[in-house]
Amino acid sequence: MAWTWFHRLGSPPYIYGLAARLTPWFAWCAALTILGGLYGGLVLAPADYQQGDDFRIIYVHAPSAWMSLMVYSTMAISAGVGLIWRIKVSHAVAAACAPIGASFTFVALVTGSLWGYRMWGTYWEWDPRLTSELILLFLYLGYMGLRSAMDDPQRADRASAVLAVVGIVNVPIIHYSVLWWNSLHHLLCSWQSPPCPHRC
Amino acid sequence: MQLAKPTMPASMLIPLLMMFFGFTVMFAALLLVRLRAEILSRERTANWIREAVAS
């Protein structure tokens, strides 16, 4: 085992085999943890003293919203690594992230909208957190659209990677939006009970 | 990000942390599956693909 072991991480056949071997471990671990978490959250946890059972949507909403940012960061970092060191596998990782991240973002927006309707009486508000999360969805869709619009894979990799890297400025904006702007979201959150996720 | 006040009872918080962990691992599993599909379509002309698919 030499220090060059990590060179294999840039080799498509090695990564293909490694991914095949690791997938079932991650899949089972995820399935068991999510089933346990849903049982704990939807069945065992007590109803909230102010929100009743409404707060339970947090068990899907908050992890989805968190993952929308995590996946984008993963995508932007691997796209950046692909740009700088011209590693094909790195671009493949970034391309694989986009539809997953877009799905998490979509779930976060829909569950947040439903929760908002119950708590604030409106499905949608042009609040900084909601707006920046919607922009995140458009970044994912733009990234995917840009890739599929280019026939030459190398050009598609590089052009979409630039978009992914530039778009990462949106991640801290989403994260700190409830602090930077004293929004409706924030004010309404402030009287809510602990399960409200947005900096109560 | 302050996700919940420390006053959130453990019976609510522990399932939430499990969901965070579970979603993260689910992302890893989905990423590995999609990465294999992505590599297959990129390397469809390579020799090692024929061997990998045959095995």
Image (cartoon, rainbow, N blue to C red):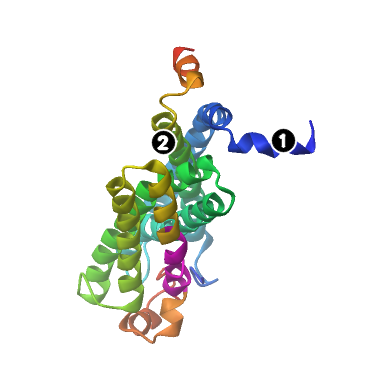
What is the x, y in percent for residue A138? 30, 61
Who is closer to the viewer here, A171 or B47? B47
Residue occupying image coordinates x 32% and y 60% = A137
- Residue furthest top as drawn: B54
Quadrant of the image containing the N terminus of chain A = top right
Q: Residues within 10 Å of mark 2 (few under 14, many from 20)?
A: some
Vertical relation: B25 (above or below) A185: above
Mark carried by residue A69: none
Label 1: which residue? A5
Residue occupying image coordinates x 47% and y 53% = A75
Who is closer to the viewer here, A155 or A53? A155
Q: Are marks 2 and 1 on the same chain?
A: no
Q: CA distance from mark 2 to mark 1?
A: 23 Å
Q: Say which amino acid is labelled 1.
A: Trp
Question: Which residues fall within the magenta stretch?
Answer: A164-175
Q: Is residue A95 left or right of residue A20?
A: left
Magenta region includes residue A12: no
Q: Is residue A6 left or right of residue A179?
A: right
Image mark 2: chain: B
Label 2: which residue? B38
Who is closer to the viewer here, A117 or A20? A20
